[in-house]
């Protein structure tokens, strides 16, 4: 590969810089949580920003000023409403460009260029990006369904900053996927003018991994929801119970682990070598690890009989 091509692959464009910054921020936050209590001064606002739901209750006492910025955790559904609409919109434009030759709108093409999308040709990126955007849209649609029909939300809260970040997150993620599409001007570049000619073994592997991870995440959310329902499916309480079954036998937060695996499946679909998406995966790893670690601490502090063999996030490791 020519040296200029290698430099292009590793260039730090605005999208990569943003995901790298988020990764560093969550890595630092996770490391701070691993420091033994008492070695670092406490900060109520900092803890309020990184905790949500049950872990916010388990954390240090919250000043009244922090409670002013509380948003119901059930508003998680808003994230997926935004994602289904926005990423469905992006998918519609990509589909039209791929199969009908319709160029991207000027404003969308300009936005992608600002974020760092380059005019390049080659590889299997057109099919890869199309599949990943489909996966992202399906993932959001399933999570929206779960918010309405599977999950049972208590009166737990999140910080308004977390809420705003969640609204922006899936918009940014969809744009990140679309920025990986090879472009020829405002049109998608397809090798041989036939999308199926780009099909490779890693597309199939990525699809299988996505389905497998999604099924396990759905099972875990069903298990959590059923802890608050009777056998007839009626919600009878909003208390926390020890979950059992599926990946809960290995980690405290298998839904977070499945989320990571879903994003890894997308990296596989990109052909393993997409640096921009691996930065997204790295961010997801540290953000989910942080949430899983705080949840694990909550379970261990609340339940004396909590299974000692369970790890927080990664089976047998962490």
Image (cartoon, rainbow, N blue to C red):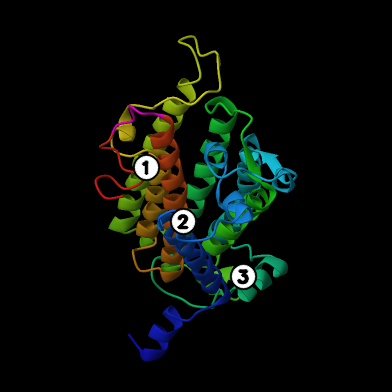
Q: Is 196 placed above or below 256 here?
A: below
In the visual, does 125 lie left or right of 149?
Answer: left
Q: What crowding class fits label 2: few (fewer than 14 Cα within 10 Å), some (14-19), or many (20 or more)?
A: few
Of the image marks 2 and 1, the number of the one nearer the N terminus: 2
Helix, strand or loop for disc 2: loop
* Mark nearer the viewer, 2 or 1: 2
**Distance Cα–Cα, label 3 vs label 2:** 46 Å
CB contact under 8 Å: marks 2 and 1: no
According to the picture, the residue beneath numbered tag 3 turns out to be 112
The magenta segment:
303-307
Residue 247: percent from left, percent from top: 32, 35
Query: Horizontal and vertical percent for residue 179?
Result: 55, 67
- The image quadrant of residue 257 is top left
User: Residue 251: horizontal and vertical position, in percent?
Assistant: 33, 39
At 40% from the left and 30% from the top, the residue drawn is 219
Marks 1 and 3, Cα distance to the nearest angstrom? 29 Å
């Amino acid at each position: 590969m020519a040296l200029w091509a290698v430099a292009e692959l590793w260039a730090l464009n605005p999208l990569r810089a943003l995901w790298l910054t988020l990764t560093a921020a969550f890595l630092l936050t996770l490391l701070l949580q691993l420091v033994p209590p008492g070695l670092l001064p406490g900060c109520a606002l900092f803890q309020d920003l990184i905790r949500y739901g049950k872990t916010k209750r388990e954390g240090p006492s919250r000043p009244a000023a922090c409670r002013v910025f509380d948003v119901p955790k059930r508003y998680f559904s808003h994230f997926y409403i935004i994602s289904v609409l926005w990423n469905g919109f992006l998918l519609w434009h990509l589909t039209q460009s791929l199969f009908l030759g319709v160029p991207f709108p000027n404003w969308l093409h300009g936005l992608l260029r600002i974020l760092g999308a380059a005019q390049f040709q080659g590889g299997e990126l057109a099919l890869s990006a199309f599949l990943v955007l489909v996966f992202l849209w399906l993932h959001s649609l399933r999570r929206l369904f779960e918010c309405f029909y599977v999950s049972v939300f208590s009166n737990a809260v999140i910080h308004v900053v977390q809420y705003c970040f969640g609204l922006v997150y899936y918009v940014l993620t969809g744009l990140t996927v679309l920025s990986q599409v090879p472009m020829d001007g405002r049109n998608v570049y397809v090798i041989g003018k036939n999308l199926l000619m780009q099909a490779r073994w890693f597309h199939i592997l990525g699809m299988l991994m996505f389905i497998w991870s999604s099924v396990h995440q759905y099972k875990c959310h069903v298990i959590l929801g059923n802890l608050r329902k009777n056998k007839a499916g009626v919600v009878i309480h909003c208390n926390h119970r020890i979950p059992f079954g599926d990946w809960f036998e290995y980690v405290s937060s298998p839904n977070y682990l499945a989320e990571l695996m879903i994003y890894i499946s997308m990296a596989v679909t990109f052909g393993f070598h997409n640096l921009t998406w691996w930065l997204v995966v790295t961010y997801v790893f540290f953000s989910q690890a942080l949430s899983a670690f705080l949840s694990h601490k909550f379970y261990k502090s609340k339940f004396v009989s909590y299974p000692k063999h369970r790890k927080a996030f990664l089976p047998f490791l962490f």
